[in-house]
């Protein structure tokens, strides 16, 4: 059986199908309950600082590991030996806390589940007050939508029953939320795929028009954050050099 090993476009470019993979690029940012500046996903590589995060020591930012990103180099620019076709973007949310035993109920908000699960009220606040925009080639904004427009399409389907939270001494119920459904069919495809060429600048910006997420509640844990991890959906030319 014949196999296509390369395709030559009319402009002379040569594409080898075997160099392309569906393995996504991904990148995370951390959202806190105070004043917020714009946060840029895909703006750092492994070993860089995670935007919006706080280190375990309570000072400085958290150093990115493979769980935060698989970007190479300094970030913000795609490697010279890679290319992307972005068919969609998925954003998952989970709560990062110093400890799951923090008393979230000391005069604050009821129904707060234990981390890394996020309270439904907090998910709704983040969806309400966050805009995300896809920027390619530094100056071109190809997408600008509320965060909820880009559902995670992954996670755990929650069946709560009579669930109680550890933080309340198992005396309070919980209200769990997530960014969209958990089925693969729940993700959103862009009408027109967007291309990021080799060596081209790009990022996904999280913007907060009101300067913060109004009412975002973490109880008495000042180090808590909501981590938003973004996945590029589509195809990616793997490093070949």
Image (cartoon, helix red, strand yellow):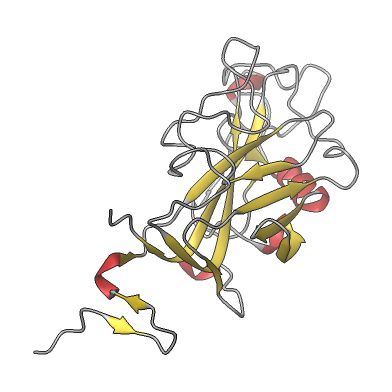
Identify whether 127 is placed above or below 186: above
Residue projecting furthest to the front: 12
**Looking at the image, which residue is at 44% across and 36% down?**
67
Q: Position of residue 30 (x, y in %)?
A: 65, 34
The answer to which of 83 and 100 lies nearer the viewer is 83
Judge left or right: residue 215 versus residue 22.
Answer: right
Q: Position of residue 222 (x, y in %)?
A: 73, 18
Q: Position of residue 62 (x, y in %)?
A: 56, 23
Quadrant position of residue 100: top right
Quadrant position of residue 2: bottom left
Judge left or right: residue 94 versus residue 240.
Answer: right
Residue projecting furthest to the left: 1
Judge left or right: residue 71 versus residue 59.
Answer: left
**Looking at the image, which residue is at 46% across and 39% down?**
73
Residue 206 seen from this side: yes
The answer to which of 149 and 43 lies nearer the viewer is 43
| Quarter of the picture holding the N terminus | bottom left
Q: Position of residue 180 (x, y in %)?
A: 62, 58
Residue 156 seen from this side: no
* Number of marks in the rendered image: 0
**Looking at the image, which residue is at 69% across and 16% down?**
103
Quadrant position of residue 60: top right
């Amino acid at each position: 059986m014949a196999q296509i090993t390369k395709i030559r476009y009319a402009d002379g470019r040569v594409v080898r199908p075997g160099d392309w993979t569906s393995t996504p690029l991904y990148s995370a940012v951390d959202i806190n309950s105070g004043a917020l500046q714009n946060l840029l996903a895909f703006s750092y590589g492994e070993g860089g600082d995670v935007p919006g995060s706080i280190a375990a020591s309570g000072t400085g930012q958290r150093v990115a590991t493979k769980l935060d990103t698989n970007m190479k180099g300094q970030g913000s620019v795609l490697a010279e030996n890679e290319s992307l076709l972005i068919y969609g973007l998925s954003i998952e949310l989970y709560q990062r806390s110093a400890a799951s035993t923090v008393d979230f109920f000391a005069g604050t908000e009821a129904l707060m589940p234990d981390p890394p699960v996020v309270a439904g009220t907090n998910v709704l606040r983040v969806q309400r007050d966050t805009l995300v925009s896809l920027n390619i080639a530094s100056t071109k904004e190809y997408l600008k939508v509320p965060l909820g427009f880009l559902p995670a399409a992954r996670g755990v389907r929650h069946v709560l029953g009579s669930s109680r939270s550890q933080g309340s001494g198992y005396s309070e119920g919980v209200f769990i939320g997530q960014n969209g459904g958990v089925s693969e069919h729940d993700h959103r495809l862009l009408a027109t795929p967007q291309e990021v060429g080799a060596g081209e600048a790009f990022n996904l910006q999280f913007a907060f028009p009101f300067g913060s997420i109004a009412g975002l509640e973490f109880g008495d844990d000042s180090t808590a954050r909501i981590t938003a991890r973004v996945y590029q959906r589509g195809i990616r030319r793997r490093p070949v050099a």
